[in-house]
Amino acid sequence: MSSKAVKVSALVYAIVFLTILILAYTGNLPTQLDFIPYLDKIGHVILYAIATYLGHSLFGYRRLRNGLPIFPLLFAIFTIVEEAVQGFSPNRTLDAIDLVMSLFGIGLGYQLAENGNKRRS
């Protein structure tokens, strides 16, 4: 994906991601798909994998001196804090499985971005 395509995709996806967060915190997520068991868990993996893939690509696959990838690390910290904050929201629930699925998505997105970067090198 070209640099411009990554930037545009990341911006559009950030808007979508933030919209989903706002809808969730205000209790306005659509309920039409609630009949599918564990769809929210699958959604966590997909949402966080795409965000990490785009973010890691946007950050140029940069790492800290100790080798940790910058975007996935920062996004994982954000995810842990955001999940903890849900315990204080009347419209959200603190759910350890959601956190695990989100972190799995971050790992998956990181791996996919790294694999794509290696193919381009």
Image: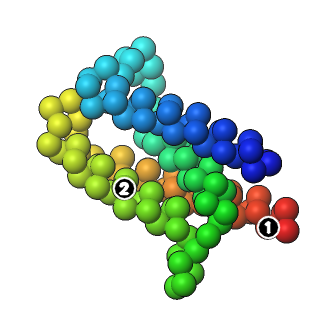
Q: Examine the rendering and report whether any part of residue 35 can be seen.
A: no
Three-letter amino acid code of the residue under disc 1: Lys
How far apart are labels 1 and 2 at the CA level?
Answer: 27 Å
| Front residue of this view, candidates 38 and 47 | 47
Q: Residues within 10 Å of mark 1 (few under 14, many from 20)?
A: few
Q: Residue at x 45, y 57 (%)?
A: 75
Label drawn at residue 86:
none
Q: Residue at x 41, y 30 (%)?
A: 20
Give residue 48's position: percent from left, percent from top. Answer: 50, 47
Give residue 50's position: percent from left, percent from top. Answer: 59, 45
Viewport quadrant of the C terminus: bottom right
Task: Quickly name the residue at label 2.
Answer: 78
Task: Quickly name the residue at label 1.
Answer: 118
Q: Residues within 10 Å of mark 2 (few under 14, many from 20)?
A: few
Give residue 28's position: percent from left, percent from top. Answer: 31, 20
Residue 21's image quarter?
top left
